[in-house]
Structures are given as structure tokens and as C-alpha cells.
Amino acid sequence: MIALYKALVPGALFSWIVSMVLRNGGSTGGVLNVHTLHIQQMAFPWSWMLFIGGTALSWFILQSMD
């Protein structure tokens, strides 16, 4: 269970970085649905599908390391 919490940070970084690359290319990523997420005064590209996929991938890697 701890591996899942540890996997949230790499999953978020993966989603943010790939979403920035896709958004700068002028694409929404199709099924990935990259959109602009507004939190208070800041806005940045985000994709929930990439976040779930990146978290699952990093969770699998962390689980296999134990």
C-alpha cells in the first residue's frame, strides 16, 4: 500500500511533463484529453488518463522492486 502512495509523485510528474509536450505541440492528445487545469491563480496542462497510467506504471515498478 505504501508503494501506491510513493507512486503518486512520479505519476503526477509524468502526466505534467507529457501534457506540457503535447500542449506545446498544439494537440489535445486525442484520448488522453489534455486540458488546462486551473488551481487558484496558476494554470497548467493536465491529463487524468496520463496520471492514472503513470501512477499505475510507477506502482508496478515499485512493487516489483520489493
Image: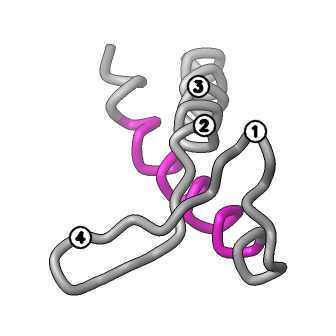
For label 3, count other residues whose C-alpha is less than 10 Å away and answer few (under 14), some (14-19) or many (20+): some
* x 79%, y 78%: residue: 26
Q: In this view, does 6 lie to the left or right of 51?
A: left
Looking at the image, tell me whether mark 1 or mark 4 is earlier in sequence order: 1
For label 2, count other residues whose C-alpha is less than 10 Å away and answer few (under 14), some (14-19) or many (20+): some
Distance from disc 2 to disc 1, alpha carbons, whole Å, reads: 8 Å
Residue labelled with disc 4: 39
Q: Residue furthest left?
A: 40
Q: Which mark is residue 56?
A: 3
Q: Is residue 27 left or right of residue 47?
A: right
Q: What stretch is highlighted in magenta?
A: 6-21
Distance from disc 4 to disc 2, alpha carbons, whole Å, reads: 19 Å
Distance from disc 2 to disc 3, alpha carbons, whole Å, reads: 11 Å
Mark 3 vs mark 4, foreground winner is 4
Query: In the structure shown, which secondary structural element does the residue marked by tag 4 occupy?
Result: strand
Inspect the magenta stretch and tell me whether residue 38 lies in it. no
Please state the total of marks drawn on the protein image: 4
Q: In the rendered view, would you say 3 is above or below 11?
A: above
Pointer 2 with pointer 1, Cβ within 8 A: yes
Pointer 4 with pointer 2, Cβ within 8 A: no
Q: What residue type is labelled 4?
A: Ile
Query: In the structure shown, which secondary structural element does the residue marked by tag 3 occupy?
Result: helix
Looking at the image, tell me whether mark 2 or mark 1 is earlier in sequence order: 1
